Amino acid sequence: IGLSTDLFAIFGHAFSGRDLIMIGGGLFLIYKSTIEIHNKIEAKEEGSTNKAVINSMGQAIFQIILLDIVFSFDSILTAIGLVQNIYIMVAAVIISMIIMIASAGMISDFINKHPTVKMLALSFLLMIGVLLIVEGYRVHISKGYIYFAIFFSLLVELLNMRMRKKNPGKG
């Protein structure tokens, strides 16, 4: 259930199903955020003349669900060890996906209104992707460091947003 059984080894390092999912999820996050950052930078440099890539609603929902699975995979494995009732685990995952899909539009609007927040969010995704890959190699990094970095960066950005709101011509 925990996908912790080693499947194969490369150069003496064993990989389990959990490790492969973490590494794959990390690579996916790094790829998607790098492409998005590249597109944002190129669009600005070229005066926003690039064609915008329009994803279908189905593709967007699929990516949201895939990201939710990647982000919550570790939590799901922990829940398996804590809760004996499978219905509670399934309900928790479904409720979290519904909340995420329902709030995606509001969050998207806020991020599109504040481009520096979007770049910050993409940077967070890069950092989380690297963290997932490192954890896929069974190297533990305390999540407290990651949460602190995210909180501090968000605090600085909120201060910058407030400053730009007070002084619109200077920021």
Image: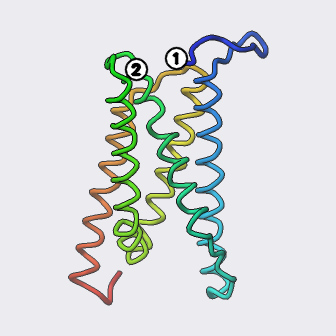
Task: Give the residue type that dot 1 points to.
Answer: Ile
Task: Give the residue type that dot 2 points to.
Answer: Ile
Q: Is residue 65 above or below residue 3?
A: below
The colouring scheme, among rainbow, by chain, secondary structure or one colour, is rainbow
Few, some or many residues within 10 Å of mark 2 (<14, 14–19, 20+): some
Q: Which corner quadrant holds the C terminus?
A: bottom left
Whether residue 100 sits left or right of residue 9 in the image: it is: left
Indicate the secondary structure of the residue bearing disc 1.
loop
- Distance of mark 2 from mark 1, alpha carbons? 8 Å
Whether residue 54 sits left or right of residue 85 in the image: it is: right
Q: Are marks 2 and 1 in contact (CB under 8 Å)?
A: yes
Q: In the image shown, does 32 or 59 lie closer to the viewer?
A: 59
Quarter occupied by residue 90: top left
At which x and y percent is residue 132?
Answer: 54, 34
At which x and y percent is residue 8?
Answer: 75, 14
Q: In the image shown, does 114 or 156 lie closer to the viewer?
A: 114
Whether residue 151 sits left or right of residue 21 in the image: it is: left
Residue at 27% x, 64% y: name it: 158
Whether residue 137 sits left or right of residue 61 in the image: it is: right
Residue to which mark 1 is pinned? 1
At which x and y percent is residue 81?
Answer: 38, 16
Q: Earlier in the sequence, mark 2 or mark 1?
A: 1
Counting labels gives: 2
Quarter occupied by residue 77: top left
Q: Identify the residue at the far front of this view.
A: 87
Residue to which mark 2 is pinned? 80
